Image (tube, rainbow, N blue to C red):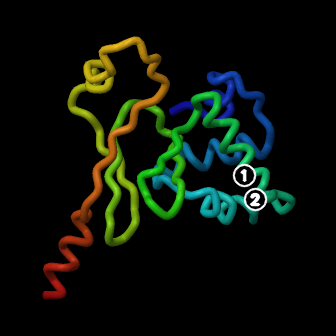
Amino acid sequence: MKTAVEHLEQYGIRPSIQRTAVMNYLLKNRTHPTADEIYSALEKDIPRLSRTTIYNTLHLLYEHGAILVLNIDPSTTHFDGYTHPHAHFYCTKCGKVHDIEFDDAQFIERNRPRNAHTLTDAQLYYRGICDKCAEAEKVAQ
């Protein structure tokens, strides 16, 4: 696994303490956190960190293609440091976002628009009830 600094440099982003910390958090925590979750996790180690810095850093990382922005949850935006093509599943019960790997790495390429559009991003979302919430429902009945 690449380090956060290597990841930033790969996308042409100059590493700073804040950028490296955000990228490191996203690479190590594949939980699709919100900006507030990232801020809460990092503020202890970087006392002068602000929410504005988090939002600006996330925007920069997204603009350079270093992270994904997920709008799968109708109430908030989630971020993903894992940029390899994959889908996401949103549980409508617990609100967690899960990665879904493709069996076929060429899925997006094969399903790109057949016209002159320039594709810069493609995301596949599923919504439903995750296995843990479904099991909890069965037990409660």
The quarter holding residue 137 reads bottom left
Q: Which residue is mark 1?
A: 54
Residue at position x 53%, y 60% in the image: 76
- Position above or below: 64 against 89: above
Question: 73 left or right of 62?
Answer: left
Residue 51 image label: 2
Left or right? Give the position of 102 relative to 33: left
Under mark 1, the amino acid is Ile
Question: Residue, x 83% and y 62% (percent of image)?
Answer: 47
Task: State the CA–CA distance, disc 2 to disc 1.
Answer: 5 Å
Disc 2, disc 1: CB below 8 Å?
yes
Amino acid at circle 2: Arg
Q: Residue at x 76, y 33 (%)?
A: 15
* Extreme residue in the top direction: 116
Q: Secondary structure at mark 2?
A: helix
Residue 13 on image: x %, y %: 72, 27
Residue 111 in the image: x percent, y percent?
27, 23
| Residue at 14% from the left image edge and 79% from the top image edge | 138
The quarter holding residue 20 reads: top right
Residue 7 x, y percent position in the rendering: 61, 30
Residue extending farthest to the right is: 48
The residue carrying pointer 2 sits among few (fewer than 14), some (14 to 19) or many (20 or more) residues within 10 Å by Cα, namely: some
From what the image shows, is residue 5 above or below residue 76?
above
The vertical placement of 106 against 72, above or below, is above
